[in-house]
Image (cartoon, helix red, strand yellow):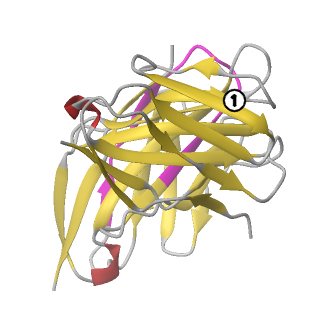
């Protein structure tokens, strides 16, 4: 089975800190995605990557950046964490022939 | 732009009854895919069912079926014989080819289903 692993399940950070959320997949998928999930808003796409060193902005990229130095790893970076970035963050990947995403278990980030 | 609309923020269903979760979509693409995901309170996203835009038959997976009405742009999820373990958040989503050929998936806001014993 495809596995998508997010390094932390829960994270508490202070306002202004630089935060790294890591995501690793083990099935050689080309496409990887970062979403944030908030009540009543569903899942909103932050950034995605379709190849190593390639990245595309999603619908809500402000305040975030990403890094994809290796095919299996896609990192989400909060340059200077703010309280409005408190959310559940979900990483997902999909191969070219797949129907749907495989998701990681999510990281619940709290910024205080 | 793609859009998914789920108009039911929350629903209740009696155990062993069937329930329909509504989903409408908007796209100008000819080729697209529609999904449903289940998210229990644990937070994991579980893939349930997929329907391609050119598939003539409605998709079924066990107790899940997708009622696909292309002209109405609707993709409702039907869960038959509800079980207590079906209590969860359900998301409708649509996959389309992004310019450049790669996949992009758009999600609805979700429906919280609660199954009553």
Picture residue at 17% right of the left edge, 53% below the top: B10
- Which residues make up the magenta segment? B19-36
Q: Magenta stretch: residue A74 in it?
A: no
Residue behind mark 1 = A49
Residue B30 shows up from this direction: yes
Which corner quadrant holds the N terminus of chain A?
bottom right
Q: Nearer the viewer, residue B11 or B109?
A: B109
- Residue at 54% x, 19% y is B27
Residue A61 vertical placement versus B50 (above, below)? above
Quadrant in which residue A25 is drawn: bottom right
Q: Main secondary structure of the magenta part?
A: strand
Residue A77 in the figure: left or right of residue A63: right
The residue shown at (47%, 48%) is A90
x%, y% of residue A91?
Answer: 55, 47
Q: Residue at x 80, y 40 (%)?
A: A70
Q: Is residue B32 magenta?
A: yes
The answer to whether A4 appears left or right of A9 in the picture is: right
- For label 1, the crowd category at 10 Å Cα-Cα, with few meaning under 14, some 14 to 19 and many 20 or more, is many
Quarter residue A57 falls in = top right
Q: x, y percentage for residue B73?
A: 47, 29
Horizontal side of residue B51 vs B78, given as left or right: right
Q: Is residue B52 visible?
A: no
Disc 1 is placed on an element classified as: strand
- Residue A43, position as x, y percentages in the image: 39, 38
Residue A97: x %, y % from top left: 83, 45
């Amino acid at each position: 089975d495809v596995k998508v692993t997010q390094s932390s399940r829960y994270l508490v950070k202070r306002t202004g800190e630089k935060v790294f959320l890591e995501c690793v997949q083990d099935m050689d998928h080309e496409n990887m995605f970062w979403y944030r999930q908030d009540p009543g808003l569903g899942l909103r796409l932050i950034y995605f990557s379709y190849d190593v060193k390639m990245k595309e902005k999603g619908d809500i990229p402000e305040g975030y950046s990403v890094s994809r130095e290796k095919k299996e790893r896609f990192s989400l970076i909060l340059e200077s964490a703010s309280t409005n970035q408190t959310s559940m963050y979900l990483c997902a990947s999909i191969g070219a022939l797949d129907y749907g995403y495989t998701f990681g278990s999510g990281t619940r980030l709290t910024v205080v | 732009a793609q859009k998914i609309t789920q108009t039911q923020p929350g629903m209740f269903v009696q155990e062993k009854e069937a329930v329909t979760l509504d989903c409408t979509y908007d796209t100008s693409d000819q080729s697209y895919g529609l999904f449903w995901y289940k998210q229990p309170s644990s937070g994991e996203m579980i893939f349930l069912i997929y329907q391609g835009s050119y598939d003539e038959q409605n998709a079924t997976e066990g107790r899940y079926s997708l009622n696909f009405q292309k002209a109405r742009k609707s993709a409702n999820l039907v869960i038959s014989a509800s079980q207590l373990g079906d209590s969860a958040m359900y998301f409708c989503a649509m996959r389309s080819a992004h310019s450049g050929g790669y996949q992009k998936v758009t999600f609805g806001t979700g429906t919280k289903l609660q199954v009553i014993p």
